Image (spheres, grey):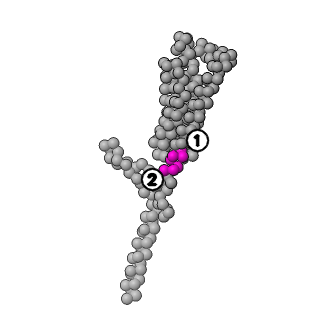
Amino acid sequence: MDNNFNQTNNQNMGQDVNQAQNQYQPQYTTVQGNGMGNYQTQATTNYGAGTVPQKPNILLGTLGALAAAVVGTFLWVLIATFTGYVFFLLGVGIAFLAIFLYTKLAKGIDTVGIIICTVFTCIAIYLGNKFGYLYSIAHDLDCTIGEAQKIFDYNYECTDAFKFDYIKNMVLSYIVGAGYSVAMVFGGFKKKR
């Protein structure tokens, strides 16, 4: 009877050890590939209190945010060149694209990602606004970019209405871009809760 008790106890103890070891092993979430089979997307580790996701890939996310900034700036300048209108709401588009591409490429977003997206969005807004005005002037007056820069500088220094319009577009672009970013971040936090 003692042997049966010890044997049963040893078997139970062996199962407990195996369960404890398996509990702390990395597990992988798989997603169906595009006809090429399954591939691993995110490693997670179960520490007994829940699953802890892997950190986002900051390098890939940064490349995504940079690509968004370049594309957004290009579209901003293109629209300004051919319409003669500097469209400040493109700040929202750039912020959306930066956050979207960062999240997709990095497999998530954290505080560092938000800062990176915000910096690239601010740079893109500045460049889009500035070059949008320059290319719009060059297109309207059929002059070179160098000549457009001189005209821009003169009007910025001497014409209050031009200076006000330029600064207003820049500020509104930052407000809508930052406002959208904040809304996206808080929306993401609410979904997690």
Q: Position of residue 97 (x, y in %)?
A: 48, 36
Q: Is residue 145 magenta?
A: no
For the residue carrying disc 2, how many other residues have a C-alpha within 10 Å: few (<14), some (14-19), or many (20+)? some
On whether residue 189 falls in the magenta region, the answer is: yes
Q: Mark 2–mark 1 contact, CB under 8 Å? A: no
Quick check: 43 left or right of 163?
left
Picture coordinates of residue 146, whole percent (x, y): 59, 14
Q: Local crowd at mark 1 within 10 Å, few (<14), some, or many (≥20)?
A: few
Between tags 2 and 1, which lies in front? 1
Image quadrant where residue 88 sits: top right
Q: Residue furthest left?
A: 35
Q: Residue, x 32% and y 47% (percent of image)? A: 37
Relative to 81, is 88 above or below? below
Q: Earlier in the sequence, mark 2 or mark 1?
A: 2
Residue that appears at 43% across and 64% down: 22
Q: Quadrant of the N terminus?
A: bottom left
Residue interval drawn in magenta: 185-191
The structure residue drawn at horizontal position 56% and vertical position 16%, both measured from the top left corner, is 137
Give amino acid for label 1.
Ile
- Circle 2 sits on which residue? 43
Number of numbered callouts drawn? 2
* Residue receiving disc 1: 115
Please tell me whether mark 1 sits on a helix, a strand or a loop: helix
The answer to whether residue 64 shows anywhere in this view is no
Quick one: 63 or 183, which is closer to the camera? 183
- Which residue extends farthest bottom? 1
Q: Amino acid at mark 2?
A: Ala
Q: Position of residue 174 (x, y in %)?
A: 59, 33
Q: Nearer the viewer, residue 110 or 62?
A: 110
Magenta span main SS: helix
Residue 163: x %, y % from top left: 65, 21
